[in-house]
Image (tube, rainbow, N blue to C red):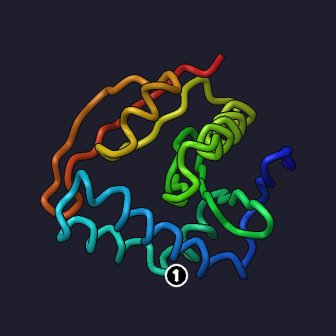
Amino acid sequence: MKTNRGTIRRVRYDDIDRISALIRNTLLISNSLDYDMRVIQNLSRQYSARNVRDMAMRRKMYVHLTDDMVDGTVSVKEDTIYAFFVAPDRQGNGIGTRLLSYAENLVRTAGFQTAKVDASVTAREFYAEQGYQTISKEKNNSYGVVYTMEKILT
């Protein structure tokens, strides 16, 4: 999908290192305001290039590109949205809203009436602004507080 502000396309093998770097950088810059460094390090390990490659094989993974720069990513499996990140210096420019809308359309097209996501403390407000409701909250010593949220798709 090409927009006047960038392109969303399926991930390719040569995107994996850039996606891993984007996610790890976002965790360090954006999420470190809400989580301690131990949690950030645990999450960063989860998004190594090897793990991102494995995720891309198990889920439908997409990137948002602006001028060939990967500045956002999201993945979907069935009714659940995963690994949704936008580069810190690009947040607030509509990339996240476009990626989330794209992911929701994938969920809807697959025949599901609701979309689910596990949201960080950092992203919870963004999801709420997009119509998601919190259905549970979990605290994990390794990964911090996570909110399970869902949205009824119309």
Q: Which residue is located at x 61 percent, y 58 percent?
A: 73
Q: Which residue is located at x 51 percent, y 83 percent?
A: 50
Picture layout, residue 55 above or below residue 78: below
Residue most extreme to the left: 141
> Where does residue 143 sit, x and y in percent of width and height?
23, 59
> Where does residue 145 sit, x and y in percent of width and height?
21, 47
Task: Name the quadrant containing residue 40.
Answer: bottom left
Q: Which residue is located at x 52 percent, y 75 percent?
A: 20
Q: Amino acid at mark 1?
A: Ala
> Where does residue 104 sit, x and y in percent of width and height?
64, 35
Quadrant of the image containing the C terminus: top right
Of residues 100 and 26, the one nearer the viewer is 26
Query: Counting other residues with Cα less than 10 Å from the Cα at mark 1, is it few (<14), some (14-19), or many (20 or more)?
Result: some
Q: Which residue is located at x 67 percent, y 57 percent?
A: 60
Task: Name the quadrant containing residue 39.
Answer: bottom left
> Where does residue 12 sit, x and y in percent of width and height?
75, 73
Q: Secondary structure at mark 1?
A: helix
Query: Would residue 131 appear left or right of 97 to someone viewing this image?
Result: left
The residue that label 1 is drawn on is 49
Picture layout, residue 22 above or below residue 109: below
Residue most extreme to the top: 154
Picture layout, residue 115 above or below residue 48: above
